[in-house]
């Protein structure tokens, strides 16, 4: 039988505020345990939550970016359960009325665009951490993370493969960073995915029993966990078994998922509206104010790159993968508007390659967009060849001459020889010195031509304008 | 000195006839002598009180005094008080010294009032007799075989026995008004949202409200002037312009329309209470007030509604007492689950556990709609009843409690009977309205009777005026138990 995999994702995006969702304590990562937990985070007797407005603003941003409905009022609810790193014995979350409802995200599967619908996005607080090492059989509790603001973004079960799920997750990851609501740092847990996976016979429109897979803190794990989980469910069904609804944990070391708790063991969270917090009212004026703050969204930019710069769709997608890359592209292209394609090629090729190799983000690129544009200008005006430009780029990367392309070209004598007289003279000498190749070429061996070009380039240490060399050589040999 | 008004005490302090250290010392001395009979305090810390009194004397000397500067005030042990044991009447917090001050405590500290001790209370404010306290029951100073009421029974007793000139209380379903009535003192629960709940250990968040307990309406007004005010650490705190609650005290009552809910005068009220209330209404008539019959058709549902909603919120509010970070933790346990179970089983008393169970039940999957949601709907109907009633009257009056103080142990085995002692007070709590009790005489066994005054939202100044005018005519509020 042919099986179809059905996936929905729940993403917890940590919101990039300075302080916690219901207290004034800092949310900076990596502090000494329990130094960023005030009386509210410790849930001392008598303390009360006060909502951080910055958190709401970020939720509104997401809602606007995905075309969702911003609910007003939305309601904070208590999710009750006991755990040592949950100081109040309940988590403040949103249940019946989330702040953001509906909306969708368009994802690009190669050339095909697909729409993933969002169910909702709701605000909630993170729990602390239980530390099991170094406590000699006891458990330590670090409440620095307790109260960190999260936006849980829940998709509809609209994905049909692990690859689609990963592309959706990457698109969402890029979007939350793009609109500046989450730093997206997956190692630090700022962007965490849970996947709801089920399978069904191809052609069926009934959803199969789903399992929720938790602990997917990288795109690779997300992909692998879905693949494992779908395979596991298909094997059960093909053996005539029944998939049990449960929550499963992904173990990256073993690349498998295993039962965390079954449906029967599921908590009754006893949700009810938190009487300590008023219903969250969001005025049209507030929404409009946030709208003004929202940057041009990736989709809009993508379309603009295709229409205004005549770039291929693929290039536009790659360049808008992050807002930083798109901004880099745009400030470079501003300096040489006629060379958008050259600019795109260089960013997608040389720049991205180098960034990947060094493992840094484009925002940390040692070459500024302006310096980069100057380099490209020297290619387009024929001062240097594309090949030489790569050497200049390397020098710029290392900060030689403050990354000034012109000074580097000048100082290293890399200026392309475009004087046709000089090139002609050189070609004459080479033709005389290589009678065999000349004969071979004239006898029909194309390869001999390339060899002659190579000799010219070698003699000029690559500085001759290749196009010019080609033309003159062809003239001489005809 | 022990039976004079706050204004008079304040004047004596201002005129340097007595210092705050001397005044505090006198009350501490009286407390030392009397408290063993009544068990009204959980914590007395003479050194800390006297240090505050000394600071208050400096404030007075430097001309920075206000009306409550240097005056001893007893604080209910529900208010987190920095450096003080803050137990909420529970074994669970019997080892908890608060590292911070509640909003209310801050406000008293700011004006230089002296904290004269933390008063006994029903455990986590759950009770109407003060018998659920881990620290043992409080006795009614009018009759030590009687309960003082609860949950603010310690504060009521302290004021009645004149161990402090005034005290704070908190009221969720009647916890200021009922003990005030049973102990023959005055107490007011303000409109929900006027007094900061920050640092006031939560029982039922949507109902809890702090308020003062004192001898007279005038004293309550002075206390309210300090206690009421916006606190940005409490999202339910109301941002309003400051009021002077003394401003309307002297207004004549001619033309006042007093609403008498027919449901409150129907049945359930004992004869002694009924007679005492009737005599009181007669005085109001003489003062020029008119009686209007009003109806609160849904008020009879307030006890069942209250006992769904308050335990629901409490079951969640008390989850933080898990033995992990502070408070009582069982001595031995084999795993996490056992640590929770043992710590909570031993740390909480029977009444608290009963309410946690009720609350957990009504919030459970499959019951939530039938209980919690339904109760919320009736709560709105009850509030609407009051809105309708206030179209016909300015103020509502009735008995605070159906009977005078009952005996210790009398209702212990019957929680429903115990819950019914809040039958007249819980409706106003559910509606968020201000409610007040003032002493109006004595009933059976010569135990005090209280008059319940319910005002419209933010009508505290008017209620205090109504009570003050009565207290100008009578001296019930100045009666002291024989000690």
Image (cartoon, coloured by chain):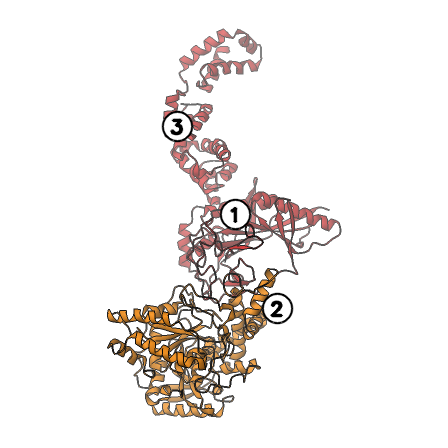
Picture coordinates of residue A245, whole percent (x, y) = 66, 56
Which of A120/B232 is in front? B232
Disc 1: which residue: A172
Residue A107: tell me if it is visible.
yes
Picture coordinates of residue A438, whole percent (x, y) = 53, 9
Q: Could you tell me which chain the residue with mark 3 belongs to? A: A
Q: Could you tell me which chain the residue with mark 2 belongs to? A: B
| Drawn side of residue A398 relative to residue A223, left or right | left
Which of A39/A252 is in front? A39
Q: Are marks 3 and 1 on the same chain?
A: yes
Q: Are marks 2 and 3 on the same chain?
A: no
The circle on residue A400 is: 3
Within 10 Å of disc 2 (Cα), the crowding (few <14, some 14-19, many 20+) is few
Q: Where A467 sits versus B448, above or below?
A: above
Secondary structure, mark 1, is helix
Secondary structure, mark 2, is loop
As drawn, the chain in red is: A
Within 10 Å of disc 1 (Cα), the crowding (few <14, some 14-19, many 20+) is many
């Amino acid at each position: 039988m042919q099986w179809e995999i059905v996936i929905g994702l729940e993403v917890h995006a940590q919101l990039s505020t300075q302080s916690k969702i219901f207290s004034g304590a800092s949310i900076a990562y990596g502090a000494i345990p329990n130094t960023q937990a005030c009386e509210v985070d410790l849930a001392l007797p008598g303390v009360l939550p006060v909502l951080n407005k910055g958190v709401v603003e970020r939720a509104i941003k997401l809602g606007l970016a995905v075309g969702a409905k911003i609910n007003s009022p939305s309601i904070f609810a208590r999710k009750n359960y006991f755990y040592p790193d949950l100081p109040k014995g309940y988590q403040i979350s949103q249940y019946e009325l989330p702040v953001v409802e509906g909306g969708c995200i368009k994802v690009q599967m190669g050339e095909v665009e697909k729409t993933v619908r969002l169910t909702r996005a709701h605000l909630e607080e993170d729990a602390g951490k239980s530390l099991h090492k170094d406590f000699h059989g006891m458990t330590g509790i670090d409440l620095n993370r307790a109260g960190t603001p999260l936006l849980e973004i829940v998709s509809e079960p609209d994905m049909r493969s692990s690859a689609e799920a990963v592309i959706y997750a990457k698109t969402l990851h890029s979007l939350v960073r793009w609109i500046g609501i989450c730093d997206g740092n997956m190692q630090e847990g700022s962007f965490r995915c849970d996947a709801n996976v089920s399978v069904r016979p191809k052609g069926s429109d009934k959803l199969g029993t789903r399992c929720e897979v938790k602990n997917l803190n990288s795109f690779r794990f997300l992909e692998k966990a879905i693949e494992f989980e779908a395979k596991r469910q298909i094997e059960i069904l093909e053996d005539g078994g029944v998939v049990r609804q449960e929550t499963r944990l992904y173990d990256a070391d073993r690349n498998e998922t295993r039962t965390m708790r079954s449906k029967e063991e599921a908590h009754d969270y006893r949700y009810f509206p938190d009487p300590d917090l008023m219903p969250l009212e969001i005025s049209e004026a507030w929404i409009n104010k946030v709208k003004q703050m929202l940057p041009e969204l990736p989709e809009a930019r993508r379309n603009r790159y295709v229409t205004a710069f005549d770039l291929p769709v693929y290039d536009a997608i790659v360049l808008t993968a992050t807002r930083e890359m798109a901004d880099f592209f745009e400030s470079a292209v501003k300096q040489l508007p006629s060379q958008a394609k050259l600019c795109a090629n260089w960013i997608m090729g040389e720049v991205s390659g180098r960034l990947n190799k060094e493992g840094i983000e484009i925002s940390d690129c040692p070459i500024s967009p302006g310096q980069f544009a100057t380099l490209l200008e020297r290619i387009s005006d024929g001062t240097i060849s594309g090949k030489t430009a790569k050497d200049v780029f390397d020098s710029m990367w290392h900060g030689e001459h403050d990354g000034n392309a012109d000074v580097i070209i000048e100082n290293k004598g890399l200026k392309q020889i475009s004087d046709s007289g000089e090139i002609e003279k050189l070609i004459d000498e080479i033709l005389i010195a290589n009678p065999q190749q000349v004969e071979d070429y004239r006898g029909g061996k194309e390869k001999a031509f390339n060899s002659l070009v190579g000799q010219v380039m070698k003699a000029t240490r690559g500085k001759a304008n290749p196009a010019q060399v080609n033309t003159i050589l062809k003239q001489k040999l005809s | 000195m022990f039976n004079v008004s706050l204004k008079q005490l304040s004047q004596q302090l201002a005129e340097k006839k007595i210092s705050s250290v001397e005044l505090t010392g006198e009350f501490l001395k009286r407390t030392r002598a009397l408290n063993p009979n009544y068990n009204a305090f959980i914590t007395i810390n003479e050194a800390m009180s006297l240090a505050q009194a000394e600071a208050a004397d400096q404030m007075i000397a430097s001309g920075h005094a206000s009306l409550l500067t240097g005056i001893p005030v007893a604080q209910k042990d529900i208010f987190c008080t920095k450096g003080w044991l803050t137990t909420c009447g529970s074994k669970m917090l019997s080892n908890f010294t608060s590292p911070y001050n509640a909003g209310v405590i801050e406000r008293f500290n700011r004006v230089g009032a002296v904290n004269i001790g933390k008063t006994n209370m029903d455990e986590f404010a759950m009770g109407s007799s003060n018998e659920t306290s881990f620290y043992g029951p409080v006795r009614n100073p009018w009759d030590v075989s009687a309960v003082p009421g609860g949950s603010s029974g310690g504060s009521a007793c302290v004021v009645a026995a004149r161990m402090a000139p005034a005290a704070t209380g908190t009221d969720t379903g009647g916890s200021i008004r009922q003990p005030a009535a049973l102990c023959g003192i005055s107490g007011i629960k303000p409109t929900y949202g006027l007094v900061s709940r920050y640092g006031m250990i939560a029982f039922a968040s949507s109902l809890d409200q702090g308020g003062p307990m004192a001898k007279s309406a005038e004293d309550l007004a002075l206390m309210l002037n300090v206690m009421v005010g916006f606190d940005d650490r409490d999202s339910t705190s109301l941002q309003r312009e400051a009021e002077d609650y003394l401003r309307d005290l002297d207004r004549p009552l001619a033309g006042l329309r007093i609403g008498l809910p027919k449901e409150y005068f129907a049945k359930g009220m004992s004869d002694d209470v009924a007679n005492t209330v009737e005599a009181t209404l007669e005085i109001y008539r003489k003062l020029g007030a008119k009686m209007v019959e009003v109806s609160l058709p849904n008020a009879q549902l307030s006890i069942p509604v209250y006992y769904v909603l308050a335990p629901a919120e409490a079951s969640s509010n008390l989850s933080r007492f898990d033995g992990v970070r502070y408070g009582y933790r069982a001595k031995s346990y084999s795993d996490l689950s056992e640590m929770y179970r043992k710590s909570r089983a031993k740390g909480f008393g029977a009444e608290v556990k009963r309410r946690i169970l009720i609350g957990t039940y009504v919030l459970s999957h499959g019951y939530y709609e039938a209980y919690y949601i339904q109760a919320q709907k009736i709560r709105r109907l009850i509030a609407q009843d009051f809105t309708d009633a206030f179209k016909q009257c300015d103020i509502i009056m009735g008995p605070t409690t159906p009977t005078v103080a009952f005996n210790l142990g009398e209702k212990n085995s019957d929680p429903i009977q115990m819950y019914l002692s809040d039958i007249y007070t819980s409706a106003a709590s559910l509606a968020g309205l201000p409610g007040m009790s003032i002493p109006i005489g004595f009933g059976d066994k010569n135990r005090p009777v209280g008059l319940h005054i319910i005002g419209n939202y933010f009508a505290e100044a008017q209620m205090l005026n109504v009570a003050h005018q009565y207290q100008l005519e009578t001296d019930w509020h100045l009666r002291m138990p024989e000690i």
